[in-house]
Image (tube, rainbow, N blue to C red):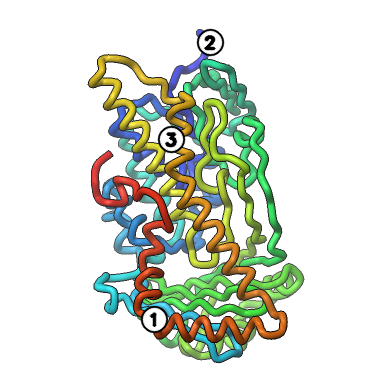
Amino acid sequence: MSDSVEVDLAIVGGGLVGASLALALRPTGLRVALIEGVTPDAAAQPSFDDRTTALGNGTRRIFESLGVWSAMATEAAPIREIHVSDAGRAGFARLDSREHDIDAFGYVITNRSMGRALTAALDAQVSLERRMPARCTAVAFDADGVSLHTEPGEQPLRARLVVAADGANSLVRSAARLGANVEDYQQVAIVAHVASSRPADGTAYERFTPTGPFAVLPLHDGHYGIVWTLSPSAAEEVLALSDADYLVRLQSAFGWRIGRLLRVGRRQGYPLRLTRSAAITADRCVLIGNAAQALHPVAGQGFNLGLRDAVTLAEILMGALADARRGGCGVDVGSATLLAEFARRRGADREGIIDFTDRLVKLFGDQRPGVPLMRDLGLLLFDLSPTAKQAMSRLSWGLAGRTPRLARGLSL
């Protein structure tokens, strides 16, 4: 199409995963378009808000390889100890990073801090076709490529491959006729930052309650990030409370492990669902991040998994380009062969993490007679097993499959 802007690859969705992919593709020399409906600094930007994300060590290594970790590190709080418990019961487990010869199990950072660092790096990427704010309104596939229309009205884009990084309700996934299974957990996560009389010391708490997981995460400024999972009706009630009444309710629910709760920032509620695409590739289309799988936040695996999607795709494309240059030929970045390789590499890690988080939610929500007792026993046995703890400490690198090069500190 002569009136179209020609690119090799179009990324629909410029949130954390989409922006990371655009940055990872920088050394490939590919012509890349990045489409995002909200500007990075907008208060309404849903990907760069004040929600906290737990970054695994593999993710930290990826950000180091991309050259953005130094801009994030001062606002990232290390998790050096983890305390897991079953609320109101005897079962608990503790993990200490010093016992595993690592500095931390991971790092807690706000999405806003990550977004700021990624945006600054993308600002220096002059070859990137950035359409922000611009909404992708239509995606049409044919044998040779993909046509994309955006609003406000700019020239259409023509790409060899489109990458869906546009979230759980992905327009691109629908256009590619890829179905998705959605399971509503009937839970709402209430997210907030709180100040306490006992500043955060690097300990993260994960408490399982009958209404869902309760996470208390250390922040870099000594405050805590709270993820309180409740039933939809209870969440509505808690969101309506005054700040003072919320702190009283939170103190009663969590206890005094972090001292007296003093102040709370803005509270927001997020319905929790598992959205899993039936496949992560279609003709000239790849799904990454929440477009491929949107997970329950328990164990903090969703973003880490999505980032591995992104850098694995970049690695495959870089390898294909290198092979083509050695052979003196071109490469079709949207070819069925490359997409099949992406699906193959991501299969084990993706399925393993989805299954792990889903089973964890359901196991600790199961109140049938005898099940809580078995959970307690399992937690206590885990607490006594160095081998089990060592295996859990490696979770942030992925559950299975090939570790991406950037997560190993290597170049593409």
What residue is shown with label 3? 341
Left/right placement of residue 246 relative to residue 383 reads: right
Compared to 41, does 201 lie above or below?
A: below
Ranked by sequence position, the earlier of labels 1 and 3 is 3
Ranked by sequence position, the earlier of labels 2 and 3 is 2
Ranked by sequence position, the earlier of labels 1 and 2 is 2
- Specify the amino acid type for callout 3: Glu
Compared to 140, does 16 lie above or below?
A: below
What residue is shown with label 1? 385
Spot occupied by residue 393 in the image (x, y as percentages of width and height): 37, 69
Q: Secondary structure at mark 1?
A: loop
Spot occupied by residue 259 in the image (x, y as percentages of width and height): 47, 89
Spot occupied by residue 298 in the image (x, y as percentages of width and height): 54, 67
Left/right placement of residue 411 relative to residue 372 reads: left
- Specify the amino acid type for callout 2: Met
146 or 399: nearer the viewer: 399
